[in-house]
Amino acid sequence: MDFSLMNRVFPFFVEAALVTLELTVLALVLGLAAAALAAAARMSRSAILRAVGTVYVSLFRGTPCLIQLFVFYFGGPQIGINLEPFTAGVIGLGLNIGAYMAESIRGAVMAVDRGQTEAARTIGFSRLQTLRKVVLPQAARLMIRPLGVNTVALLKGSALVSTISVVELTYTAQRFIGSTYKPFEIFGVAALLYMIMVYAIARIVDMLDKRFAII
């Protein structure tokens, strides 16, 4: 094993890992926003909103994320939408993970005892007040682990954006392999950095879980 090579390329890989983190964070923010809207739509009294939410979740969960990235990046110009590779990556990954997170949020909200909702409405809380003061605080505790799992999946799935030329960790590894012909060492460094990032996310999820457990 060529440790000197691994040491030389490590700084470049750290820079690429920061791009991966930036991509993941932005996609996560978009995904959470899309998930909240989709979950609300699927629990709405409006049949139209429920249908819209269902179509979104079914579409993005039922098709490969790679195809979705290709549609946003390569298909966009056909309808006059030209996206930079990074932007297309954020949108594609964000909307994809949002579909999965929507089900996690909806499941957590529906898991809250319906009797508490009815009790809150009985004492005069509006539907919005009941959701904000009674349902969401309890549902938040149930959401943490599933959303943490989705965040890890998002981080690892971000490697797919290398196919649309986003210079992140996997793309950087592929470029170095082309010049060094040492895939074991190069992918070893990339795998180490992915593991560090996944470990950091897992620790954050643990801290949030403990924090909500005592609230």
Image (spheres, grey):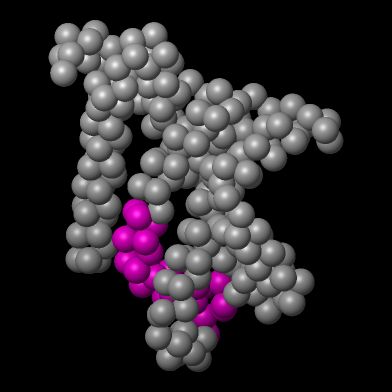
Number of numbered callouts drawn: 0
Residue 140 painted magenta: yes
The residue that appears at 48% across and 59% down in the rendered structure is 101
Q: Is residue 127 above or below residue 100?
A: below
Task: Say whether residue 144 is left or right of residue 92.
Answer: left
Q: Quadrant of residue 188?
A: top left
Q: Is residue 24 above or below residue 55?
A: above
Residue 137 painted magenta: yes
Q: Quadrant of residue 88?
A: top right
Task: Name the quarter where the C terminus is drawn.
Answer: bottom left
Spot occupied by residue 84 in the image (x, y as percentages of width and height): 64, 24
The residue that appears at 41% across and 53% down in the rendered structure is 150
Task: Say whether residue 209 is left or right of residue 21.
Answer: left
Q: Name the residue nearer the viewer: 127 or 105.
A: 105
The residue that appears at 41% across and 79% down in the rendered structure is 111
Task: Name the quarter where the N terminus is drawn.
Answer: top left
Q: Quadrant of residue 148?
A: bottom left
Q: Is residue 84 above or below residue 202?
A: above
Furthest-right residue in view?
79
Spot occupied by residue 139 in the image (x, y as percentages of width and height): 39, 70
Q: Name the residue nearer the viewer: 99 or 73.
A: 73
Task: Say whether residue 17 is left or right of residue 72.
Answer: left
Q: Which residues are magenta?
A: 124-149
